Every structure is written in structure tokens, then in C-alpha cells.
Image (cartoon, rainbow, N blue to C red):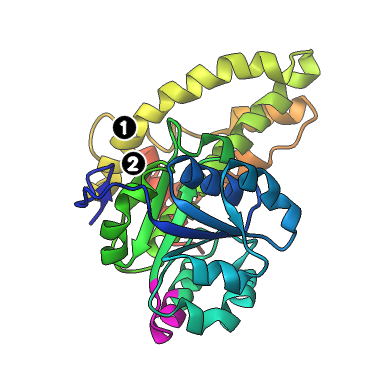
Amino acid sequence: MTHEGNDNGNNTDPGGIRVSVLGLGAMGGALATALVKAGHETTVWNRSPEKAEGLVALGARAAATAGDAVRSGDLVVVCLFDHASVHEVLDPLAGDLAGRTLVNVTTTSPEQSRELAAWAERAGITYLDGGIMAVPQMIGGPGSSVLYSGSADAFRRYGPLLDLWGTSAYFGEDAGLASLYDLALLAGMYVMFAGFMQGAAMVAPAGITASDFASRAAPWLTAMTGAFQEYAAVIDGGDYTVEGQQSLEFSDLGDILAAASAQGVGTGPIAMVQDLIRRQIEAGHGTEGFARVFESIRRPV
């Protein structure tokens, strides 16, 4: 079950909540800035104290220690380097965190998120895990979204505050689901970026700049995202023989590979897709639709 947008079942004014933010890198700083500007009593902490100076100028309070920061907030937001750093900072403060709500937006794996949720439950801490689908400059603006899973009560209670950062989506009590969705979306993004770079490398020897290539690639790839729902319907239906699909045999990428090689550039990204196609053809599914490469990924050799 998902819940998206600003309709989070809580009409409480988001201002006035005491919030502590631990970790003031580019993303943590952006989150804290949005809170201060919304009128929250915001306490901030970072290993390098100088990173708090700009926020203090806006009205935040800088805590001398992580413990001081935790004790100052009803809601504690953690945006640190990795899973290990979260434990390093919070383990000694479990007693201070008891009875408070912890929102962890540090990038972690699904299993790490579940481990943190279990740790929090043992310590009497309400836990909400978050995956930020934005770069720091987008926080609080158009296109920013944050995925959450874990405590439904925390999501409802602090929903208006969470919406300050971007559109909020809730995926359920399993604390690992937000991270899973986050990483899956990033996987799609990075493969798309690699595909763009494959194309840019192919045209470069002909004197075409990456900027010129991007001016054509961006509208083309944007238009092609319209096929996602069509592919999704086929995958969810489980029938790769339905009419109207481009067959795997027709999708063979041999010509693209040959063109890349002739240009003297690498073929890694496109060769990866060709391998997915060939596996299904060799298994006897060549006349079925391209969406069947999903099966090559879902059931790796």
C-alpha cells in the first residue's frame, strides 16, 4: 500500500515542532534549511561544526554534541554518510532517543534499514526510514519526493513536516521498502545515464560533441519513457506473446554493437542489453516481446 502527496491524514500546522538534524552535508543542510524556514525550532549537529554556521545565521541552534542535539528535539532526523556512521553516532544515545521519533534518510540497503528499525524498536524509539529522490538543490521545490516506510503513526503525525522537503510517499510498515524502492529507481537512472554515455561515445569520433548529442537524446529518451507502462502491463500479465510487441529477434542489437566497435569505442552498456536479449532467444523465446528480458534479470544464471 502506498500513500502519496500531501493528504497524510494530519492537518496539524507543520510549524512549531522541535526538530534535531544530525549530519549537515549538502543534503542534511538542505533538509535543515527547509525546516528553519518553515518556523520549526531546529537544532543541528555535525562532526565539523563550521557546517552549522549558515544555518545558525538563519535561526537554527548549533548543538555542541550529538547527544545535546538529540535531547533538544521531539523528532530527530539523521542524514549521515552510511549505515555504520548512523550506528556510530546513535548507539551511545539510545537512551536519549527512547520515546522520540527517528527519521533516518541516510542511504542504506533494505536489510540495513530493517536492522535499524529492529534496533530502534528494542530501544523504544519510533522509527521511520526515508529515501530521498532529489538532489539537495531540489529539496522543497518541484520534482522533489521522499519515500518512507516504517512507523505509520510517525508518518501520519509528522506528515505536514515531511512534506516540506517534497512529495511524501509511504510504502508500509516494512522499514526496508523505502530503501528498496529508492535503490531500484536509482538503478533505472544509472542504466539510462550509461546508455546516454554509450551514445555520446559513439558519435564523438565523428566530431559531434556530447552537448549536441544531448540536445537530441533528451527529448528522444523522454518520449520513450511512455513505453514503461506498456512494458509493465505485459510483465504484470505474464504473457509475452500478446500482439503489438517488438519481438526479441527483431530487437537484436548486433548492428549497434558493430557501429560502436567501428567507431573504436567500448560497448559495455549496449552489450549488457544484448546479453539479456540473447539469453531469452537461446531459451526459445525469440518471437516473444522485448519485455521478456525482465525474465533474464529476475532469474539470473
Place of residue 245 in the rendered image (x, y in percent of width and height, measured from the top left): 31, 32
Relative horizontal placement of residue 37, taking residue 25 as reference (left or right): left
Q: In the image, what residue type sits under mark 2?
A: Glu
Residue at the spot of label 2: 288
Closer to the camera, 155 or 76? 76
Check whether the beta carbons of the residues at disc 1 and disc 2 lie within 8 A of each other: yes
Q: Where is residue 109 in the image (x, y as percent from the top left)?
A: 52, 65
Residue at 45% in and 24% down:
222
Residue 125 colored in magenta in the image: yes
Quarter of image, res 85: bottom right
Look at the picture and state if 90 lies above or below 238. below
Residue type beneath disc 1: Gln
Is 118 one of the magenta-colored residues? yes
Q: Give the range drawn in magenta.
A: 117-126
**Residue found at x 22% / y 44%:** 7
**Which quarter of the figure is the N terminus placed in?**
bottom left
Specify whether 201 is left or right of 31. right
> Is 117 left, or right, of 233 in this rendering?
right
In this rendering, is residue 2 above or below 206? below
Q: Residues within 10 Å of mark 2 (few under 14, many from 20)?
A: many
Q: Is the magenta region chiefly helix, strand or loop?
A: helix
Quarter assignment of residue 143: top left
What percent of the width, then of the height, locates residue 138? 52, 35
Tag in front: 1 or 2:
1
Residue behind mark 1: 245
